Amino acid sequence: MSEQAAVRFLTNLLGIYSPSGKEEDIANFLAYEMKRMGFEVGKDGIGNVIGVVGEGEPVILLCGHMDTVAGHLPLRIEEGKIYARGAVDAKGPLAAMVMAAAAAAKEPGFKGKILVASVVEEEATSRGVKHLITQGIKADYAIFGEPSGVENITIGYKGQIQLKIVCRTQTGHASMPWLYENALEKAYELWGQIKNAYPYPSPEPSESPFNAVTACLVKVTGGRATSVVPFEAEMNIDVRVPIQFSTAQVFAEIEELIAKYQAANPKVTAKATVLDTVEPFEVNKASPLVHVLSSSVRKVLNKPATLLRKTGTGDMNILGKAMNLPIVTYGPGDSHLDHTLDEYIDISEYLNAIQVYKETLLRLSELHNHKNGNQQAS
């Protein structure tokens, strides 16, 4: 398929507004277009679109998401860039994967099956990818489509704990604040101790952000009336967990810290609740998938790939832990533009990513079948 057709496909995707929970229109468009490209296409019970092309082994999963954060941006093309909500996060990578899979499967030497999964609600609940896992999807290799930059490969993400802490105290009239503990003040005092336990920048100069536990206070609510000392306060804290820890280990540390705070403040009760967790994940750098994708980047761009470890958390964590297979995140676009009012993708980078994905699919097919052929011969 021509470069013009590839750009038209992406532009059409970007023209469909698809915030999390409202993916039906884009799902129908994707299903229709992928059938035209030669995929066998189905929609599962929650709206994920699964396209299959090719047959046999290896089975390669390309997984991207078709939802975006809320907030429509006018679609425009200027100076070789496409501006639109989802241009980099993550319709650019998704479109590139679809185009590459269709092209690779048509190559005479290609053997294998490519699954392209376009999932829902990545920006909200990860419901789409979690449903894929419960349906028992199987693959030998997987690539998750998110903007890494066309020359970069993301091999690791930190884990995440979404934490809620509720502080309660006795209350009384706001005209006599010295008689009572103020739940809002005590909650913030407790937050200060949590923040001090996980300082960043780290006092250890050699420690990178990827290797540090970090905590961010994202929401505080409390107080009921203007003349009443607040007796309940709720904090939401976003904790990011590096690869050397589990979320359970870090939560146990925080619970211990809260217990010490309560012992020192007997008039305060504090209860921590985990709203959600995602475990940290890092693929083995020696994985054939990392090697093949790195080689493909070098061939297409004529420069070496850079391996990234990110401080965020992605659906790659969920897939990688559940499926226990080699998985990386790769895709065109600058992730610093995610969710911004200036989101755009360079057309040249998008087209290069299609070639990198295609080359990777062909090399994985060749590697897998060559290895199997050698095993049979011996």
Image: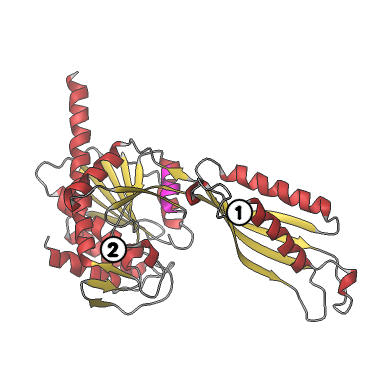
In this view, the residue farthest toward the top is 378
Q: Secondary structure at mark 2?
A: helix
Residue 54 in view, yes or no: no
Residue 339 in which image quadrant: bottom left
Between the residue at mark 2 and the residue at mark 1, the CA separation in whole angstroms equals 36 Å
Looking at the image, residue 168 sits to the left or right of residue 108; the answer is: right
| Residue where numbered disc 1 is placed | 199
User: Percent x, y for residue 340?
Assistant: 40, 71
Residue 238 in view, yes or no: yes
Q: Secondary structure at mark 1?
A: loop
Three-letter residue code for mark 2? Gly
What residue lies at 28% left-to-right and 67% top-to-bottom? 345
In the rendered image, which quarter contains the C terminus? top left
| Residue where numbered disc 2 is placed | 92
Magenta stretch encompasses residue 315: yes
Q: Nearer the viewer, residue 169 or 25?
A: 169
Q: Which mark is residue 373?
A: none
The correct choice, above or below, for 6 with respect to 59 in the image is below
Magenta stretch encompasses residue 337: no
Total marks placed: 2
Three-letter residue code for mark 1? Pro
What residue lies at 35% left-to-right and 38% top-to-bottom? 285
Prevailing secondary structure class for the magenta stretch in the rendered image: helix
At label 1, counting other C-alpha atoms closer than 10 Å, the crowd grade (few under 14, some 14-19, many 20 or more) is few
The residues colored magenta run: 314-320
User: Percent x, y for residue 309?
Assistant: 41, 49
What residue lies at 27% left-to-right and 44% top-to-bottom? 60
Looking at the image, residue 217 sits to the left or right of residue 158; the answer is: right
At label 2, counting other C-alpha atoms closer than 10 Å, the crowd grade (few under 14, some 14-19, many 20 or more) is many
User: Percent x, y for residue 19?
Assistant: 41, 70
